[in-house]
Amino acid sequence: MSPNGEKSPSSTKAMPAHRSLGLTDDQLLGFYAQMVLVRVMDDRLIALNRQGKVPLVASCQGSEAASMGLALAAKTDGSCFLFPYYRDMPLKLVMGVSPMETMIGHIGKDGNTFNGGRQFLLQGASPNFPMIHLSNVVGSNLSQAVGYAMGCKILGEDTVVFASFGDGGSSQGECHEAMNFAGIHKLPVVFCCYNNRLAISVPQEKQMAIEDLADRAAGYGFPGVVVDGTDSLEVFRAAKEAINRARDSSGGPTFLELKVERLKPHTSDDDDTRYRTPEDMEDSLRRDPLMRLNVYLMGLGILTPNLDEQFRQEARAEVNRVTDAAENAPWPDVSNLHGRLYAP
Amino acid sequence: MSPNGEKSPSSTKAMPAHRSLGLTDDQLLGFYAQMVLVRVMDDRLIALNRQGKVPLVASCQGSEAASMGLALAAKTDGSCFLFPYYRDMPLKLVMGVSPMETMIGHIGKDGNTFNGGRQFLLQGASPNFPMIHLSNVVGSNLSQAVGYAMGCKILGEDTVVFASFGDGGSSQGECHEAMNFAGIHKLPVVFCCYNNRLAISVPQEKQMAIEDLADRAAGYGFPGVVVDGTDSLEVFRAAKEAINRARDSSGGPTFLELKVERLKPHTSDDDDTRYRTPEDMEDSLRRDPLMRLNVYLMGLGILTPNLDEQFRQEARAEVNRVTDAAENAPWPDVSNLHGRLYAP
Amino acid sequence: MTVKSTIEAIREAMREELAADPRVMVLGEDVGTRGGVFLATQNFIEEFGEHRIIDTPLAECSIAGVTLGLSFKGLRPIAEIQFSDFWWYAANQLVGEASRVHYGTNGYLSAPFVVRIPYGGGVRGGLFHSQYIESYLYNTPGLKVIAPSNPYDAKGLLKSAIRDDNPVIFLEHKKTYRAVRGEVPDTSYTIPIGKAEVKRPGEDITLISYGLAIHYGMEAAMLLEDEDVSVEVLDLRTLRPLDNETILESVKRTGKALIVHEASITGGVGAEVSAIIAEEAFEYLDAPVSRLCGPDLPAMAFAPTLEDGFMVNTQKISDALLKLAAY
Amino acid sequence: MTVKSTIEAIREAMREELAADPRVMVLGEDVGTRGGVFLATQNFIEEFGEHRIIDTPLAECSIAGVTLGLSFKGLRPIAEIQFSDFWWYAANQLVGEASRVHYGTNGYLSAPFVVRIPYGGGVRGGLFHSQYIESYLYNTPGLKVIAPSNPYDAKGLLKSAIRDDNPVIFLEHKKTYRAVRGEVPDTSYTIPIGKAEVKRPGEDITLISYGLAIHYGMEAAMLLEDEDVSVEVLDLRTLRPLDNETILESVKRTGKALIVHEASITGGVGAEVSAIIAEEAFEYLDAPVSRLCGPDLPAMAFAPTLEDGFMVNTQKISDALLKLAAY
Ligand SMILES: Cc1ncc(C[n+]2csc(CCOP(=O)(O)OP(=O)(O)O)c2C)c(N)n1
Ligand SMILES: Cc1ncc(C[n+]2csc(CCOP(=O)(O)OP(=O)(O)O)c2C)c(N)n1
Ligand SMILES: [Mg+2]
Ligand SMILES: [Mg+2]
């Protein structure tokens, strides 16, 4: 019941992994460039937080491959709908949210389409993107995603729904209820659990008495798969398979356990030196998803040092541009505090 | 991880099952007599409900072996504490609650030590018995039981805690959270799930996509065992093993899935002909725990038709006696509505 | 027009909306083959099929969450929480999440669903089958909360709730299900959410209530006729938004107000109504705004003596009215 | 006496009780090695060990349920819900179950625990890190609810709460954690639960508030001195049970009352206070009992302009006081 995927790091073989997954060299290069942008953006947000300009950052560093790999599968599929969580800034960018919207959303300036300044981290929902990220209450997106998937099924649509959450979120009763419900109705939903072995400071062994969360899927009657979540291509592959399974006549949900790392403190409010050892941090850094993809592409000669430098410069330029623009953007008018509480 | 016990119906062999479990013939006969009393009591409560004298009955018929088998193990052990649920009238009687207290508790007369007439079904807690049954909100006894078990462990006591619930209760998020917490801390708690394949009218296949709930225990790092819950001795055996495991240094929780039957409607408010077929009912009746124990004891010659008739007459006399006494007992004084809201 | 019980009116409202709008659906524990434990959805599964009438696992948190997710997709689910006593597990999805959908997305998304919740005592349900929960809901911006007192209102208001584009909590007093009967049109009609009704005009005191207590209030008002006290009875019907206009208009006229509800007094709907009157009609008041409410106890106790002691009744109300009249 | 921040006072209260009573223990998310996200339990795990300071999984329902179970066993757990915004998952165990322990067992069992909950806005937390939840708690018979405004009260009240044999919800305004500092004895002392404090005597208007808003209220009262209006400021400190006696004594003297809180107005603590005054001090009133409260919105919005618009401040309060003075 629990076909735990083996760790098969996407390495250079006869046919490079990404091509056998149907991705062209250019597509993967573009994806890499976007991951560079994500990193530069994340670093900038952290810097702006230190300057008191961005109230909160939930750094995505270490889970980019998971977040972006899922989004790439969803985006190339074309009929997916996502219920992301707070560490999913990269997912949002891959789905098409602009750097500018991301930046003003983080500062709280006027004009983002997700929440109009009412929420942070681009929480909310936008007319422009197939995703809902209502709150940061850990667990509550899960049964909502399941309900949404049921709605799609009732309406005869072939949408597949992704819901992201962390190892911490797996402890919520809501997670159990959502997985159970999805199993009963064989709903087209992919439970994407980013396991970085930490819920803020609480290590995995204080969160659960098991090694692999994917093992729990058997208790709901659907497959659970362990994936190296720092390997973009493995994530992409597993997500594609889950999408196919969701549409299968005998199919239904999949639980993807994406083994990821957390390279930064939990959020900008956190100080992880209180609870992480330097060795632990170093281990994590060795699995930096950006570095892994870089090594893969360099190994194949698809990426060169020059091209890499170019991507980094472009990313910096773009992030500089949106930082300036966002800093000059107006604040939401206080009148926006009121109204749009009830649908008319 | 999930050593699903085989169905080994306790049949006549060289050494009868109960003796190899350390129960004397007399002990088992006494247990049988109590099961007869439970049946007569349950039937009487149903009759009194029809007469408008007992507002609600949650018949235990079909789960007596589970409820009483657990209680027998707890009682003979001597250091167990129980968090029962509404179908556990038999468990309470085995633990020593008198038929009189049971009867006044059901009618709502003055004098029961569990709740003084404030609650039905003897919900509450009594100075005289090692059990807490605070509410009938399905699921909420589970994390309470886990907390209690943790308290026992902290205080260095060797108490083992039992928590009962149904297949329906297994769907609650609370169930997941409680099991996860117990697994992490290897707490001395036995999760006793009475699976009668029905949550009121909702059949198992609409409640979960799996066959055996015991399989879920693996996801919490402790054993799950399937037990024939209509076989008193099998329940007793499994409960003893769980108690031992709880006290083991490497031990901790056990999940017991007790496969039981529901021989009556969900409660006296229910009409099960709306959702059960006559065939389904007949199948259930063939697994009547009282009949099974009767056959076992008759087969061994420990019980005779005469003795059986004597037990039944004694039970009827006792139930008649407490019915009369309870009907003549006073109602709680209206002043008992107030007070004892806050501990002083 | 036919005389119907409250539960029949509720069933009829859902049935009509299910028939009229394919987006409407029902989910909850035992709502399928069983037809609901109170038979509110009797025969629905036969008529509308398993895809629209869904028996859920026993899990209130996900019942609410799945309902919310369905509403995001444009369906119009009606969820049933079997008893009010079990709504707490659903609190996060209802109060925490659903109430903030429209506001938190700056108006882009909405959550058009109804959660029906049988509540209230007088049915020998004890502490965990009798709860009044309106004090935890009417104070929630972003929700609408309805509590009808009779079959006619129940049908019209439930239909409005189903058609409303916001999350609506529909509180059904269990004791009214069969005990309260009345004329109900067999055809479709709606009653606007947010409008109180003057059940009985009067001049001396305004009695403000809702749900089952309205009936005791009407009886008490009749009794007071013999004492030459003219009582106006207001049925709030909607607890959020409160119909301040109707309340104030009446109290300004009578100068005296008695608020009656069965829920515990502290922080109940009566507290807010009293505060609104204090703020907006101070100069019209001839007596203290008074409340006759459930005692500050966790819920209805089980034994009949205790249950009777808990409940509001005609006698208690007429005593309170007489006291106010004499002020 | 040393000047301490509110969070330091809270930490000190717990530390003293942990040291004095082996039954006291702490559990919650990140309360161990991390010392709590607000550092309320900093270094506790080193000092008191893993068996008394327990990092829990991310699961509020069971945090509350396990806490309740521990209290049944005679321990005195202090649970932390990391932010008020996440308490909804714990509602069943706290409101549904814990509040009914003593009542539902006819006084046999009790539930001596404290749940500490950081709440409130002004910290750029947006809709889901700023919530006011007291309207869902102060109305609950069987619970005690405390909301201190300053370090001295926080320490003394938290110690009383830990020693109390009932379930106590201890609401800590996040913005007071570091921003509000004051003299706090280094030794042990308690403050009785259920007693409001007159922070400032006055004759013309009674200003009733609690939590962070008290500080704005005190500033406003000072400003009003220049206008020759004498404002008495009452800090409720305990929201359940309310100290009706102190409230009524003051309002009967001043004849005017302004209730101030940041939580949404409808159904808030102010509603109940207003209703009590209406019932018990009607004849002493010279003006409508008034409320200045948070708007009826789901929670604090994120952008600074919006957040500022939401929050109560000194200016808004002094305007309201002036209006009342002129009545
Ligand atoms: C219901 C709830 N409880 C607590 C929190 C506070 N909190 C925010 S993130 C977090 C840890 C989440 O860990 P995990 O799910 O593993 O995700 P990660 O941050 O590691 O990606 C906690 C405790 C919350 N947001 N929601
Ligand atoms: C939280 C909650 N939701 C709903 C109910 C109503 N209810 C009472 S018993 C029951 C079914 C329980 O089924 P199961 O757990 O299998 O136990 P069984 O009655 O079959 O022994 C339901 C839905 C409840 N008591 N508590
Ligand atoms: Mg994590
Ligand atoms: Mg069952």
Image (spheres, coloured by chain):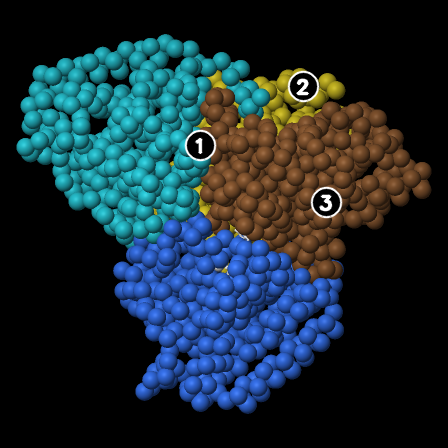
Chain colours: A blue, B cyan, C yellow, D brown
As shown in the figure, which amino acid type bears the numbered disc 2? Leu
Q: Are marks 3 and 1 on the same chain?
A: no
Q: Check disc 2: other Cα within 10 Å, few if <14, some if 14-19, many if 20+.
A: some
Q: Secondary structure at mark 3?
A: strand
- The answer to whether residue A30 of the structure is visible from this angle is yes
- Judge depth for marks 1 and 2 and give the one in front: 1
User: Residue B187 or D113: which is nearer the viewer?
Assistant: B187
Whole-number angstrom distance, CA of label 2 to CA of label 3: 54 Å
Give the answer, above or below, for where D111 lies relative to C64.
Answer: above
As shown in the figure, which amino acid type bears the numbered disc 1? Leu
Which quadrant of the figure has residue D5? top right
Q: Secondary structure at mark 1?
A: loop
Q: Residue at x 72, y 72 (%)?
A: A327
- Read off the residue under disc 1: B155
User: Residue D288 or B306: which is nearer the viewer?
Assistant: B306
Give the answer, above or below, for where B17 lies relative to B257.
Answer: above
What is the chain letter for disc 3?
Answer: D
- Read off the residue under disc 3: D5
Query: Residues at badges 3 and 1 in contact (C-beta under 8 Å)?
Result: no
Q: Check disc 3: other Cα within 10 Å, few if <14, some if 14-19, many if 20+.
A: many
Q: Position of residue C261 (x, y in %)?
A: 59, 30
- Read off the residue under disc 2: C322
Whole-number angstrom distance, CA of label 3 to CA of label 1: 34 Å
Q: Position of residue B152 (x, y in %)?
A: 42, 33
What is the chain letter for disc 1?
Answer: B
As shown in the figure, which amino acid type bears the numbered disc 3? Ser
Q: Residue at x 28, y 36 (%)?
A: B244
Q: Position of residue A8 (x, y in %)?
A: 34, 74
Looking at the rendered image, the quarter that the N terminus of chain A falls into is bottom left
Residue A225: mark in rendering: none
- Judge depth for marks 3 and 1 and give the one in front: 1
Q: Are marks 1 and 2 on the same chain?
A: no
